[in-house]
Image (spheres, grey):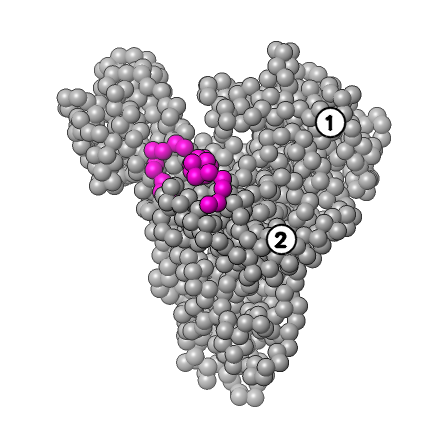
Amino acid sequence: MTDNPPRAAVAGVGADASANAMAVGDAWRAAACLAVDPSGTGAVLRADPGEVSSMWLEAVRAALPAAAPLRRVPAHIDDERLLGGTDLAATLRQGRAVHVRGVLEEANGGVIVLPLAERIPVQLAARIGNTLDRGAISVAQSGRVREQATTFGVIAIDSGRAAGERCAAALCDRLALHLDLDALSPQDAAELMPERAAIAAARVRLPSVVPGDGALQALCATAAACGIDSLRAPTLALRVARASAALDGRVETDEDDLEFAARVVLAPRATVIPADPEAAAPPDAPPEAPPDAPPPGSDPGESVDSAELPDRVLAAARAAIPAGLLAQLVAESSARRRASSIGRAGASVVAKRRGRPAGVRAGKPRNGSRLNLVATLRTAAPWQRIRRPAASTPGPRVQVRVSDFRVTWYRQRTQTVTVFALDASGSSALHRLAEAKGAIELLLAECYVRRDQVAVLSFRGRNAEIVLPPTRSLLRAKRSLAGLPGGGGTPLAAGIDVAAALATQVARHGQTPSIVLLTDGAANIARDGSGGRARATEDALLAARALGGSGFATLVIDTAPRPAPQARALAQAMRARYLALPDADARTLAAAVQHAA
Amino acid sequence: MSPVYPFSALVGQDELKLALLTAAIDPRVGGVLVFGDRGTGKSTAVRALAALLPPMRAVVGCRYGCDPQQRDTWCEECLARVVTNRVPTRRVPVPVVDLPLGATEDRVLGALNLEQALSSGVRAFEPGLLAQAHRGFLYIDEVNLLEDHLVDLLIDVAASGVNVVEREGLSVRHPARFVLVGSGNPEEGELRPQLLDRFGLSVEIRTPQDLAQRIEIVRRRDQFEREPKAFMAAFEPQEAALRAQIMRARRRLARVEVSDEALGWAARLCMLVGTDGLRGELTLMRAARAVAALNGQRQVGIDELIQVAPPALRHRLRRDPMDEAGSGQRITRAIGELGAKLD
């Protein structure tokens, strides 16, 4: 067991500084760790549905014990299938309640796979997370509630592309391994995967594996230095390190295990880039920690001899932090905490089964719509005499056919998401930016009454960016609006394009988008980023026409000191309402938007 | 029964622990709202509390777990069934019921019993989550993401202590008195003011920034996961002591005195920070009394008041969307102005 080939492979390519190659070795080792301790680890895979993720899943499945179930859970699963419930067909046939087990109970001792995890509703994520926490589900059966123990691993495959399309944070936080499989190619065969027998042996050894000297300190300090607040992260990292040690036949975690855990558990969660120890900064003080947070001091009581261990683990984590994150963090000079911005995606999926009851119609209780028993029985009642051939026939007293089924339908007010597109360019909007910010905050302050959400994107310089994904939180809005810069050119076309894309995304989630565009209409940056007023205006009108075709409610607010025809032309092209507000303050602006929406 | 992390093994988070103990000693304090970061052990603490509390007595055969001692809170079934003075009782654990985010109204309120309706055509009521939570805790994780129609019904039941079901041809009312415990992350959305007001105490928790404390938390978690039985056994003496302390505090609660000076101080504090309505003062007094009982005091002193003032008042201050200062700081400042003594 000491000369384990995958181990060597990991170390070899790890030294090779190529992030891609490192991911390959780690990905297979992670699969092995998941197979060793499914319920203790769990994984979120960033991957397109396809060959690579199938290969990875197949590797995990092959390494699990033969009896361990692997269940796929689609995003549309209903509660009955997830948690168990009554088998309607059997209940009708037998005349007594027949209970069926849910997927979470069936998966006991195995793994559940969530394909398209970015699309799962936050409710489903909450249930799965809750079951993971408790290690049990409550089963209601014949008026009694009993606890049914079930433990399983979760593999969420997140194929989200657009910003904000991410697996729910509540679930991701509870899953240890965060892997980016896009780096893998189908040629990276599963040879790196340890033998099945080795994994089985590791599973037996796992309970006796203890954290080595300074292991806890190394993981906690690294997590703190990476700006990870959740204490689940170091806890899960420790589980992974233990599984890794068990794979190598040891009963104590060593440095390699911790470094591996830091790469696959901690680095992907990093919200700040840890300081480089060579830059003479203390290793466990986040360089861009929020000012109100005291830097986590190192613990003098903890072993001194293992003082260099945290450095090594931290270095491993730093090296594994995805390059994209680095660029993003550098761009955001203020270290805003990003952790909670993910996971809003599914939060507001419209559910057809909730809301106020609005009526009854014929239909099968599927996809969560609930059988309306009274209506069903009422429908069945007139046919009872005909359906019962002889009074003496044994069987249920009430004969119900599938055609009698009635389901209740519900009406739920869909949420409105107001997308603000702010012209933050130098031309005119700079002095209006403060008013726009104020208006957005005022609208948000009323959001808890109207239950609506607000999103903000700004365009300036060469491109447009989403400053605030759809939210209802005043706190977040304030944070991101406070740091909103102004000045530069006016890439109006890009702004309209991004607004349209965001609105489409909102609509796809079942919410009603409305767009408020604040601009003076003076475009001077074309779609391709080149300057020139004529091209830019042409592009802007094109984008406006495309947006007009989508049918979203749109309002153009002309912010020019002297309203000019160009903004009006823009509004016409996008079939928007036009409002000239040459000298509005935050309050009139908020009132105008509210009135128009 | 899956193993539950012991309450006394929780590291740090003193305000949260105190708030939960207060609610356990005197349920009339109202619920506890816990706002804070992910992975700070919010749900662990709530579940640990339930496991810590001693089992309670319930009427045998009652679906709602009515309290044999308090006939005036009984459900209609118990009132109809139990005619003698001698009520058969059984011991049941204090319920902690999870209200999942996507719960349907039938699941929460209760609905027609499918089995009986189909097999014998009888229209019978199957209790929902609110019935299960009677005399215990109703725990809502991510309470700020809860759908509006569920919030509406929770506000109503939490205020009245009675669940009235008028649907699917049913007409049922049953007692549903529970301590509402909600948790969430304020960055993901605000809480409706009406629901916010239902919570007696509000606690803000953050991940401890002290590395030693973080290490200790992870260490204990690891020990618990590896050997849950041994871990629970190791903490059993502390659990037993705490359990006894809670029981003593409950017995002592009615005898704890609140002096006029203490009342005056509380009223002045509420006026100074500008809370809406009188619920703030009431909660402050009740919570201070529960803490005094927990500490074995006969009288509510200034220490208890200062200790519970932030959680009791934090969420009741009038909010200005443009104000940056945290409400906790405003309370601390007001306490400083008042002076930490009763006179």
Pointer 2: residues within 10 angstroms few (<14), some, or many (20+)?
some
| A423 or B172: nearer the viewer | B172
Q: Secondary structure at mark 1?
A: loop
Residue visible at 68% across and 33% down in the picture: B215
Amino acid residing under circle 1: Gly
Circles 1 and 2, Cβ within 8 Å, touching? The answer is no
Q: How many marks?
A: 2
* Placement of A382 over or under A2, stated as above or below: below
Find the residue positioned furthest to the front: B343
> Residue B291, image x and y in percent?
56, 51
**Picture disc at residue B296:** 2
Q: Is residue B328 magenta?
A: yes
**Picture disc at residue B67:** none
Q: Which residues are magenta?
A: B317-343
Pointer 1 indicates a residue of which chain? A
Quadrant hosting residue A574? top left
Residue visible at 46% across and 19% down in the picture: A333
Q: Secondary structure at mark 2?
A: loop
Amino acid residing under circle 2: Gly
* Placement of A417 over or under B21, stated as above or below: above
> Residue A19, image x and y in percent?
62, 20
**Picture disc at residue A301:** 1
Left or right side of A193 for A539:
left
Pointer 2 indicates a residue of which chain? B
